[in-house]
Amino acid sequence: MRTANSGLLALAAALALIVPAGAGPAVAQNGLPNLDQVSPIEEALAMEVGDVTLTLTGAVEARYTTGSDEDEDNGPGLIGSLGLTAMTQLPNRWSVNLGYIGRLVSDEALSTEESERYTDAAALSAGGVWGTVSLGNVSATVRDQTRRRRGFGNAVLAFDDFHGERADRSAGYAGRVGPFVASGVVDDDSNVDLGLTFQRPIGNGSRDYRVTFRAGKGAYEAADETHLFTSRGFSVVGEVVYGSTLFDVGLGQESFSSSAVDAARWYISSGIRRKIMVWGLSLEGHYGQIEGQEEVSAALGIQYDLARGLSANFGLNYEDAQVVLGDVRFLDSSDTKAVFSLTYTF
């Protein structure tokens, strides 16, 4: 059982309800692109109602999946997301944001939550020079700040995260001091996620580097749903940008404990992204072990910008992990699939 709807939560984080401006990427590994990353030549729709600014962002994606071992995943599908943010500034210069985002899929196989075609998330935040505090569906915020950049198109690199997750409802804080951004989240099960990001340009601005650290406690249910594990982990990410090319690598360690069995995990993930005119290309790989048993994944992504807000996308994704701990089937995931899509964002 997943303790958080990671795809939708990442989309909720994309509303920037907790993240200071310029703090870094907010990215989703499932479904549509993040709604804060609209087309570079098209702004979100906005209007003023008194002292409140309303901002509307959205995305529609038509996709086709083939090659998956899960028959219900193959075939056409349609995904739509819509986000609304209301922002105002108080007399003491605090900024208050209220955001809501909904996601509708044409088939349950495309959903990030089992048997749900419509999923949503909301969050409330208040911020000033001291940082930003938030309440709601914000448990993915630290992950979004500290993770590796995701690939282009429909690339999804499996296992590139802690297996342990935090519950849906959370409270968080984020603040910037110079090149540092510190963030933290605590959920209603007392699980904690903490992150620190350092990012600076090099030279004339054509080069950039970023280093992140993350430590967290969460919960993970075994693949056979027989045991619930407490997860504790930490990860570091290093990133270098040179012109239109980005290279990054992430390292992580995670320990699991339960009444029946304990386990330890380590992993390394790496990738390269390059933007060439209207083309975006990425290649990523992941390798890890849980008590000596392997987890492996790879992802190839291609994005082609067709027109204003419109892009054609491709992703080839591979994953394989069969981990058994005594009588517990801890992790069972094996698949290879290709995903084609046409996406419009505003």
Image (cartoon, rainbow, N blue to C red):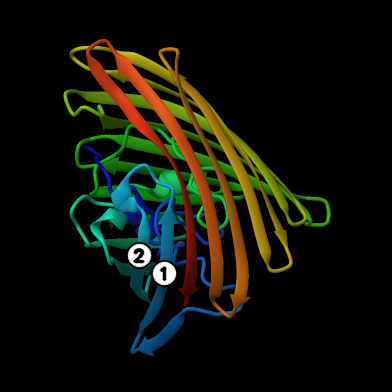
Mark 2: which secondary structure? strand
Task: Residue type at mark 1: give it.
Answer: Ala
> Counting other residues with Cα less than 10 Å from the Cα at mark 2, is it few (<14), some (14-19), or many (20 or more)?
some
Q: Nearer the viewer, residue 202 or 266?
A: 266
239 with respect to 54 (left or right) = right
User: Which amino acid, mark 2?
Assistant: Gly
Image position, residue 287 (x, y; %)? 53, 27
Query: Which quarter of the figure has residue 257?
Result: top left
Residue 30 visible? The answer is yes
Other residues around mark 1 within 10 Å, as few (<14) / some (14–19) / many (≥20): some
Question: What is the residue that sits farthest to the right in this orientation?
Answer: 204
Q: Name the residue carrying label 2.
A: 77
Vertical side of 343 occupied by 275: above or below? above
Question: Which residue appears at 19% of the width and 57% of the height?
Answer: 116
Using the image as rendered, state which of residue 111 and residue 67 is in the foreground: 67
Figure check: 334 above or below 32: above
Q: CA distance from mark 1 to mark 2?
A: 6 Å
Write the residue at 24% across / 51% down: 113
